[in-house]
């Protein structure tokens, strides 16, 4: 099993930036991909970005396009998500998740096997 803990959320002013962290522990060698999602009240969980074991990364083409950067530190089992030019509509709970299978749709939450508890990001106008 893999345990995930997100951090870095909080209250941010519109136009600002936030760097979210995802710390993985447990059977980290089983991780094939790490993804970031978010969920706002009353909305479905939304894919943001993912990074694969190979180092390849994928970003959403939605409202966050061009404002994200995903990175990782393999030695620390950490994955980061930098979000810039934040808007009030970015307010949500942000989750990291990992896929412990070699194949799966990076964009789909059902492809991920383990999830963190989430970290709240609130963007004030």
Image: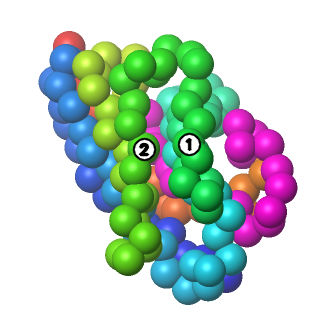
Tell me the tag on residue 70: 2
Residue at 37% x, 23% y: name it. Answer: 67
Residue 94 included in the magenta stretch of the image: yes
Left or right of 55? Residue 94 is: left
Taking the view exactly as shown, the residue that stands out farthest to the bottom is: 26
Q: Is residue 106 above or below residue 13?
A: below
Q: Judging from the image, what secondary structure is the residue with disc 1 in?
A: strand
Q: Which mark is residue 81?
A: none
Q: Mark 2: give few (<14), some (14-19) or many (20+) Cα within 10 Å.
A: many
Task: Please tell me in which quadrant of the rendered image residue 11 appears.
Answer: top left
Q: Is residue 40 left or right of residue 46?
A: left
Q: Position of residue 92 (x, y in %)?
A: 43, 34
Q: What's the magenta region?
A: 92-109
- Residue 5 visible: yes
Asked if residue 14 lies left or right of residue 87, the reply is left
Residue 110 x/y as whole percent: 79, 49
Height in image: 101 above or below 94? below
User: What's the residue at 25%, 38% (across, down)?
Assistant: 18
Q: Earlier in the sequence, mark 2 or mark 1?
A: 1
Identify the residue at horizontal 58%, vertical 26% (top origin).
Answer: 60
Q: Residue at x 72, y 56 (%)?
A: 112
Question: Looking at the figure, which quarter contains the N terminus?
Answer: bottom right
- The colour style of the image is rainbow
In the picture of the structure, the residue carrying the numbered disc 1 is: 57
At which x and y percent is residue 52?
Answer: 61, 54
Looking at the rendered structure, the secondary structure element under dot 2 is: strand
Separation of marks 2 and 1 at Cα, in angstroms: 7 Å
Quadrant of the drawing holding the C terminus: top left
Contact between labelled residues 1 and 2, with CB atoms less than 8 Å apart: yes
């Amino acid at each position: 099993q893999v345990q995930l803990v997100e951090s870095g959320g909080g209250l941010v002013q519109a136009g600002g930036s936030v760097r979210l962290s995802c710390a993985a522990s447990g059977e980290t060698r089983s991780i094939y991909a790490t993804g970031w999602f978010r969920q706002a009240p009353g909305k479905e969980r939304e894919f943001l970005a993912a990074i694969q074991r190979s180092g390849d990364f994928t970003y959403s083409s939605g409202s966050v396009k061009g404002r994200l950067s995903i990175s990782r530190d393999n030695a620390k089992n950490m994955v980061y998500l930098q979000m810039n030019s934040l808007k009030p509509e970015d307010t949500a709970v942000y989750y990291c998740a990992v896929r412990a299978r070699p194949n799966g749709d990076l964009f789909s939450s059902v492809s991920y096997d383990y999830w963190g508890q989430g970290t709240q990001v609130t963007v004030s106008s």
